Amino acid sequence: MRNRTKMLILTVAALVFCGLYLFEGLNGSYDYALPRRGIKVVAMALTGVAIAYSTVIFQTITHNRILTPSIMGLDSLYILLQTVLIFFLGSTHVTIVNKQVNFVLSVGAMVIFALLLYQFLFKAGKRPIYFLLLVGIIVGTFFQSISTFLQVLIDPNEFLRVQDKSFASFNNINGDLVWWALGILIITLIIGWRKFNELDVLSLGRDTAINLGVNHDKIVKTMLILSSVLIAVSTALVGPITFFGLIVANLSYQFFKTYKHSILIAGASVMSIIALVGGQWIVERVFTFSTTLSVIINFVGGAYFIYLLLKESRSA
């Protein structure tokens, strides 16, 4: 089957799931329910595209298909920021109650952290990308340890608010934030779209890419920044989803079997929309909110991650 046909099938499936989520069970309450469902669908599509895009380019840069941008510690930083705000200021403070303020603070903190980390590491000289990943793992573990320590000391009522911030949720999304995030996503995609051909070459390896005329260090820095921005926006909008990018990126590799990033990223993005919209429909209609979508994704993603590790070890 040609890749164009595969993409068409996935697109039709995504539209079917979106239509099912939007119109199933409305019972005539179009004015009330339809706009709210529409915002949730836009948020899920935006989140899926951001995570898929950032994961594919991150795995191309690292030449490793079992890594995700979460390894840089951005998810841990987000949880730490929410914990610190609630611990010192309280859950009724404007930085928590006002979702616009919280969104700006969260995105700003994660992007600034990523920029400082990249600037510090790349300024010191030619360091391998795995050194950057090692530092990211250590810093992320450090952030997580501080968060756990503060959560032990925090008031139990405030702890519930921290727990709400620690899991991705599409149920209480602010419509204004969706359009802010959409604007950032569009700008980021426009910048990254022009780099797809260079990413195709970069996937061949550092030495080969340099010999073919690609400015390796510049493209790596640019893609790392774009990846960090996308993860920051998606995390600040709905919360952390750890393994989701790992699932859709590897499914796209298996389904399309091509080196072209324009196809891989588009395929992973459509798969993300299918998974999020379809999964949220199941959570609401089948499980009746007895569980959350992030729990299901993390469970499936964790199992898939273990499978990939075992597969890599056998092939090695």
Image: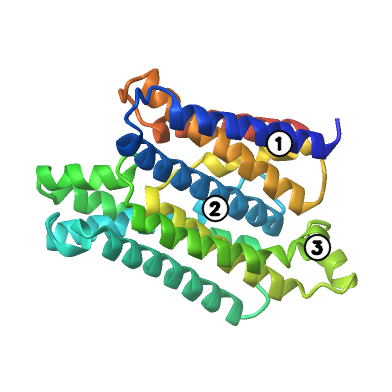
> Which kind of residue does numbered mark 2 sit on?
Ala
Query: Between 299 and 280, which is closer to the camera in this rendering?
Result: 280
- Residue 110 in percent (x, y) is at 42, 65
Q: Is residue 58 left or right of residue 198?
A: left
Give the spatial CA distance, label 3 vs label 1: 28 Å
Give the spatial CA distance, label 1 vs label 2: 27 Å
Q: Which residue is mark 3?
A: 197
Image quadrant assignment for residue 139: bottom left
**Residue 169 in view:** no
- Residue 158 in percent (x, y) is at 13, 48
Quadrant for the C terminus in the image: top right
Neighbor class of circle 2 (other Cα within 10 Å; few <14, some 14-19, many 20+) is many
Seen in the picture, residue 73 relative to 296 is either above or below; the reply is: below
Query: Quick check: marks 2 and 3 in contact, CB under 8 Å?
Result: no
- Local SS, label 3: helix
- Nearest to N terminus: mark 1 or mark 2: 2
